[in-house]
Amino acid sequence: MNINATLIAQTIMFILFVWFCMKFVWPPIMQALSDRKKQIADGLAAGERGKQELEQASKSAADEMLIAKQKAAEILAQAEKRSSQVVEEAKGLAQEEGDRIVSMAKAEVEQEIVRAREALRQNVADLAVAGAAKILDREVDAKAHADLLKNIKAEL
């Protein structure tokens, strides 16, 4: 065998091998590399989007937390205000009830005073009649002298 023929045959075989690889092997490999490159780029972009969404979610959560704290503070202020109003209303009602009880007690005392005065007048009138009866040494008839006794009661 001749070295030149072997070298030419090997060169032809190498060219055929390169052509075969470029025609049938290279495109799927390049397609797989391209797909993998695209997949990696998409994954990195999704990771970046996720990072941005996480930051945005953290920001919105902080904003929501601030709003919730403000609302809670408002609700507490309203509750304190309402409790103060309830206490003031209760004080007012208690004062009114106390005034009512005092006025009823005063009215009852006035009625008792009037009854006591009336009873005292009756007792004084009876004592006056008894005293007059002893003085006159005879009994004074209360029915007969009713007008006189009414005048005495009125004067007392």
Image: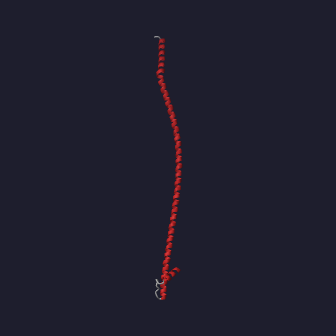
Residue 112, compared with residue 18, is above or below; it is: below
In the image, 78 versus 37, the foreground residue is 78
Residue 8, compared with residue 135, is above or below; it is: above
Colour scheme of the rendered structure = secondary structure
Q: Residue at x 51, y 66 (%)?
A: 100
- How many labels were placed on the picture? 0
Residue 50 percent coordinates (x, y): 51, 37
Residue 133 percent coordinates (x, y): 47, 86
Whether residue 156 is visible, yes or no, is no
Residue 96, compared with residue 70, is above or below; it is: below
In the image, 2 versus 92, the foreground residue is 92
Q: Residue at x 53, y 58 (%)?
A: 85
* Quadrant where the N terminus is found in the figure: top left
Residue 37 percent coordinates (x, y): 50, 29
Whether residue 63 is visible, yes or no, is yes
| Residue projecting furthest to the top | 2
Q: Residue at x 53, y 47 (%)?
A: 67
Residue 134, compared with residue 16, is above or below; it is: below
In the image, 114 versus 6, the foreground residue is 114
| Residue projecting furthest to the bottom | 137
Residue 148 percent coordinates (x, y): 50, 83
